[in-house]
Amino acid sequence: MAERIERVYVPSAVEEGGKGLSLGCFSSEETAWNVLRSFLRKSDRMLLTAASVVVWDVDVIGEHGLTVLASLECKDCPVCTRQTFWVDLENFSALCHGDACAAWVEESTHEPGVIDCGWPPMRFLKQTKSIDEAFTELFKLGDQVKAAGITEHSGVEASETLLDEFDAKYS
Ligand SMILES: [Zn+2]
């Protein structure tokens, strides 16, 4: 007997101007997220403003069948300045989907109330007391990166030197 599908996972995105883009509906949450994530990499070229993943229970009439798993909002990335920084409004976390960036902000899983932020290309990691503070740290880092002329293609060595200078300045 074929397995009956009881729930479908639906990722979608919204373009500037409000036009919705359907990305399909999927039988697993993981697939829905994978489809959305790979789509969001293009967000700086497409001017997307929002995205979401919802789940629909099949054969339920009306809104009761709908659960919003995540709604994301697109902002300019504090580090790379591209419009690829996606903020999850439900359970606060943010991640840049731009190539070679991946700047992020997230509530600490170990210490409640602590907000972590980071930038993997330079192995930058900082703990802060608030979301605002975390963004300030990333903006500061973005300024350093711009000032040093570090591009996404420059080597790890250059990044490490910058990180040392950065540490000396701010800690
Ligand atoms: Zn970025």
Image (tube, helix red, strand yellow):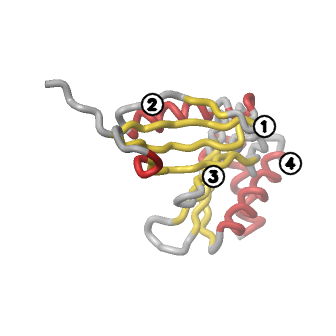
**What residue type is disc 1 on?**
Gly
Q: State which tag comes first along the sequence, 2 or 3.
A: 2
Q: State which tag comes first along the sequence, 4 or 1.
A: 1
Q: Are marks 3 and 1 in contact (CB under 8 Å)?
A: no
**Quarter of image, res 39:** top right
Nearer to me, 78 or 19: 19
Residue for point 72% across, 57% down: 138
Q: In x, y percent, where is residue 50?
A: 66, 43
- Is residue 83 depicted above or below 111 in this figure? above
Q: Which of marks 4 and 2 is in front?
A: 2
Q: Is mark 2 on a helix, strand or loop?
A: loop
Circle 2 residue: 25
Q: In x, y percent, where is residue 14?
A: 67, 37
Circle 4 residue: 147
On the question of residue 154 being in view, the answer is no
Q: Do the residues labelled 4 and 3 touch (CB within 8 Å)?
A: no
Q: In which quarter of the image is the N terminus?
A: top left
Distance Cα–Cα, label 4 vs label 2: 44 Å
Q: Which of marks 2 and 3 is in front?
A: 2
Distance Cα–Cα, label 1 vs label 2: 23 Å
Circle 1 residue: 17
Q: Is mark 3 on a helix, strand or loop?
A: strand
**What residue type is disc 4 on?**
Ala
Q: State which tag comes first along the sequence, 3 or 1.
A: 1
Residue for point 75% across, 55% down: 141
**What residue type is disc 3 on?**
Val
Q: State which tag comes first along the sequence, 4 or 3.
A: 3
Residue for point 63% across, 74% down: 129
Q: How crowded is mark 3: few (under 14 residues within 10 Å), some or many (20 or more)?
A: many
